[in-house]
Amino acid sequence: MSAARKAVLRAADVSKVFGGTVALNHVDFNVYRGKVNALVGENGAGKSTLIGILAGVHQPTAGEILLDGQTVQLPSPRAAGEHGIRLIHQELLLFPNLSVAENIFAGSELRSAAGVRLREQEREAARLLERLGQRVNPRSLVGDLAVGAQQMVAIAKALSQQVRVLIMDEPTSALSTREVESLFQVVRALVADGVAVVYISHRLEEIMTIGDFVTVLRDGKQVAEAAVPEIDSHWIVEHMIGRDPEALFPYEARPVGEPLLEVADLTLPRPGGGLWVDRVSFSVSAGEIVGVYGLMGAGRTELLQSLVGERREAVGCVTLNGVDLHHEAIGARIARGLFLVPEDRQREGLVQALSVKENVSLASLDELAAFGNLAVRREAREVGAVVRDVGVKVPDINHPVTALSGGNQQKVVVAKALLTEPKVLLMDDPMRGVDVGAKAELYRIMKRLASEGIAILFTSSDLMEVLGMADRILVMARGRITGEFAREEATSGLLVAASNPHAVKAVA
Amino acid sequence: MSSSQFGALLRTRPGWLQELLDELHTPHAWRSLLLRLRAFVALIGIVIVFSSISSSFFTGSNLRVMTEHVAIVAIMAIGETFVILTAGIDLSVGSVAGLAGMIAGGLLNDGLVLHPFDAVIWFNVPLVILIGLGVGATAGAVNGAVITKLGVAPFIATLGMLSVARGVADLRNDGATFPDLGGEPKHHNTGFDFLGTGNLAHIPFTIVLLVLFVIVAVYIAKRTAFGRRVYAIGGNERASELAGIRVHRIKMGVYVISGICAAMTGLLITSQLGAAFPDTATSYELNAIAAVVLGGSSLFGGRGTIGGTVIGAFVIGFLSDGLVLVGVSEFWQMIAKGTVIVAAVALDEAQRRRQSRASAAVASIIEEVVSSEKSAAQA
């Protein structure tokens, strides 16, 4: 395919290095005018970095960006905006406490000598939303809108200024089917107007529906580019994974013991109505690795948070080794052998200001202290042992934890968990933002722990991870368990079907 | 030179030196050392400048007097350090000091008057001191409870206590002072002046007390589970919670410590003056916070040392006393102090930005070293 053909925006031989990690490795990416340019890849493949570079958030370490065949510098999102390149983040980045009109014009207010011209902003906002086929009062607070409507506000914000390239990062991850439909209509209208859309999604069927071109990233490299009519979703999966999932997650059957963690009718109310977790019951046995698959917002994280005692408003019965954990705080549950490796390493897993050693021992200080007095030598010894055990690559455990790469930081969190001698290990999306090598290593650690009799419950939104690692798979959608599959019977088709949130509605 | 060669070089040194070098070898230690060094450089600068202006500045007797003044700031600032390490703030320390002084003063002056029984109970000096410290602990516990149980922001909660504690101090004797703290032999309550003016083996007791507080505080910060948790909460409260730390309990603890330290300061001042004034230590919270910040603690929590705070207190104390010595007016002192505080924080921010770039570089170096050692091991 001729790369120069109508490519309005082009990343040419772009590389990006963060600290010691190569996020992008000589990547080419073409964005064609009037087309939907889909960008796919596993978590950590480099999609976010690439669109960050296109939108002026990151600067490429090497390579260049071409706009209409001319090299451009995009030192800031504002500079990219001036070239008509706009990014809509997955989290939308709107101000929930401001009105729709104020959000649309935040940062580019229509001003007169007397201040902001609110009326004119509201009129203009209404016009933009109408163009998107939306009937939203420009005065309503964004926080009061449904996610789909918020998405439209974000698009309207992008359209409030001249836009040539619109980058949408997983725009459908929180939308209902009907909202997805209207989003697609908007996207088609934009494309017909000559806007180049960059579309990132995990949902392959969406890419087959809306995409014109697809580019696949894997481990920071561009591995394939094709016109959508010429391919099928199998082609995408093949290139995304690039290898047999069996090779990444070599499976061995393990003996499974008695049930350790038993959950009955666990329910977590959602503030503002509805349920995060809806009457969930299951059990995990010693030596078993159970995967929880589900899309974003299915309630996976909330389930694990309820199990570990972080969500005090959760009701239902959780027993560990036959002991009822009701009313027990996080610390007490840790002492009983339940530990959560949280989803967001930076925000929940690590204390950045502390060293590797201090992070690893953080959950075991009671065991390492007698009458409050820390046994520092014992601490260093035990932390050193567990750090070696999980293979954290660090020359000295007194190094700051921020000096480690993503995979190594995740191993620090796992080391912290292991030092508490858990019986049940909960891991919330443990492979997120971890490179392929570290993934394989983490899986090796998980298998070894399981073979030592630890029960592991992990979550993932990545089909290959779940299918590759789990002995048994639970599928969640809308807070419920919508499917349970033994390893042998699980297929990606079954999991996807069970994870569809709209199927739940039909059942309910 | 690879890190292993460097390590080999170090192993030929005597034990203590190697230990020190090992510690400095880690980027973390260099960072905290640099932060402490900054205040230290300022301190040396102050000493040099004032010594050159006034010959009486760098003399034994003046240094002694100044250190006694420093002790007052430092003890209060040590308590404040624990609070700031959790990303909190305690604005009430000055008022709590005043309140503790007034309570102690009242007990020494009038005893505990029980009106319904027409009786007076007299306490001896150690008990009076304990009660004074208890008042501080109580004020701190109230601060902690309002912050953790009611969810009021530390700034507001302790701002409230600043006003309330001062009000109670005023109420204690209707705005009047307790002028005579000498005590009477028949009540067994003499000797309160020893706290602020006495000597122990020719060393002012105030300084002995400072050293004692520093040792205990360093031990708590570095060698106890509590101290580690204080740092962890300030660094990342959510991660600490998920590690099973009872965040509320630790926060209660730091405000109680801060209250006790503030009360100690109040008792020291009261003892030095020989009388309890209701407006004792007014606006001392500024000195305490300034000392903590100058000492390299981050107001965002998780970063800071007791040692740094003590040096910060020396900077504040020497600066004020030096300015007095060379005859600068009190108003200029306030301007100088304010400028120094803001400059210290600005410097801290600049340093932090440089470090975040540096830590990215360190990360790549570590990866390189590890991978080269790995390939060497395989070969």
Image (tube, helix red, strand yellow):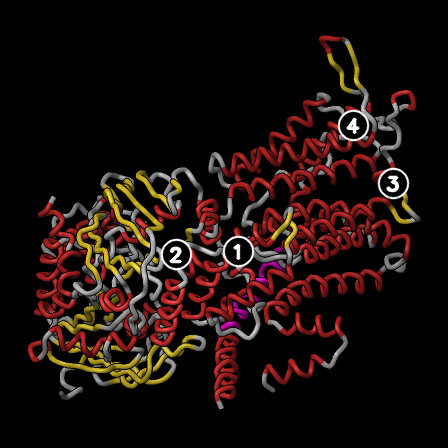
Majority secondary structure in the magenta region = helix
**Crowd around label 4: few <14 · some 14–19 · many ≥20 (10 Å):** many
| Magenta highlight on residue B151 | no
Looking at the image, is mark 1 or mark 3 nearer the viewer? 1
Tell me the residue that label 3 is attached to: B197
**Crowd around label 2: few <14 · some 14–19 · many ≥20 (10 Å):** many
Q: Nearer the viewer, residue A501 or A281?
A: A281
Whole-number angstrom distance, CA of label 3 to CA of label 4 = 16 Å
| Magenta highlight on residue B347 | yes
Tell me the residue that label 4 is attached to: B105
| Chain letter for the residue marked with disc 4 in the picture | B
Q: Is residue A187 visible?
A: yes
Looking at the image, is mark 4 or mark 1 nearer the viewer? 1
Give the residues in magenta: B341-360
Q: Nearer the viewer, residue B11 or B241?
A: B11
| Chain letter for the residue marked with disc 3 in the picture | B
Tell me the residue that label 1 is attached to: A362
